[in-house]
Amino acid sequence: MKFFIPATDSKNYEATHAELITRSSAATGWKVSSRQIYSVNCVYEGLVTVATVGKKFGYDGVVHAILEADEGTILFTEKRGILSGEPIHLGKGGMIKDFDD
């Protein structure tokens, strides 16, 4: 799968990704990598699940971006971090799949 961010013009994918990294780092104080992540296996609300960019994640809406930080994974969905609220902070250790180059 080629890198994309839902509801974003393809010309702005990189800039939007960079802005989310900057926002996350400023809000958490964590070092956030520029890795372009497609999906992550995780435990969320007691359930083992997979968060995938472009797909719905429970009641939080479509996943827009998944970021990797020193302290864990940061998940941006429509309702958590994009349109309102804070992104979801997942723990470390989930299996991560990157977008294809």
Image (cartoon, helix red, strand yellow):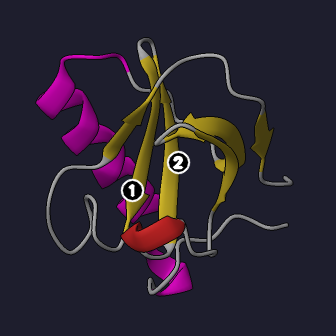
To which quarter of the image does residue 71 belong? Answer: top left
Toward the viewer: 83 or 4?
A: 83
| Picture residue at 15% right of the left edge, 68% below the top | 84
* Residue carrying label 2: 66
Residues shaded magenta = 9-31
Q: Is residue 42 in the magenta section?
A: no
Toward the viewer: 59 or 67?
A: 59
**Percent of width and height locating residue 49:** 69, 48
Classify residue 65 as left or right of residue 29.
right
Above or below: residue 63 compared with residue 75: below
Q: Is residue 29 in the magenta section?
A: yes
**On the rendered image, what quadrant is the N terminus found in?**
bottom right
Above or below: residue 53 compared with residue 12: above
Classify residue 16 as left or right of residue 86.
right
Q: CA distance from mark 1 to mark 2?
A: 6 Å
To which quarter of the image does residue 77 belong? Answer: bottom left
Q: Main secondary structure of the magenta part?
A: helix
Residue 71 can be seen in this image: yes
| Picture residue at 51% right of the left edge, 67% below the top | 58
What amino acid type should be assigned to the residue bearing mark 1?
Phe
**Percent of width and height locating residue 81:** 25, 58
Q: Residues within 10 Å of mark 2 (few under 14, many from 20)?
A: many
**Percent of width and height locating residue 85:** 14, 59
User: Label 1's element?
Assistant: strand
What amino acid type should be assigned to the residue bearing mark 2?
Ile
Above or below: residue 28 compared with residue 16: above
User: Label 2's element?
Assistant: strand
* Residue carrying label 1: 76
| Picture residue at 26% right of the left edge, 37% below the top | 24
Q: Earlier in the sequence, mark 1 or mark 2?
A: 2
Q: Are marks 1 and 2 in contact (CB under 8 Å)?
A: yes
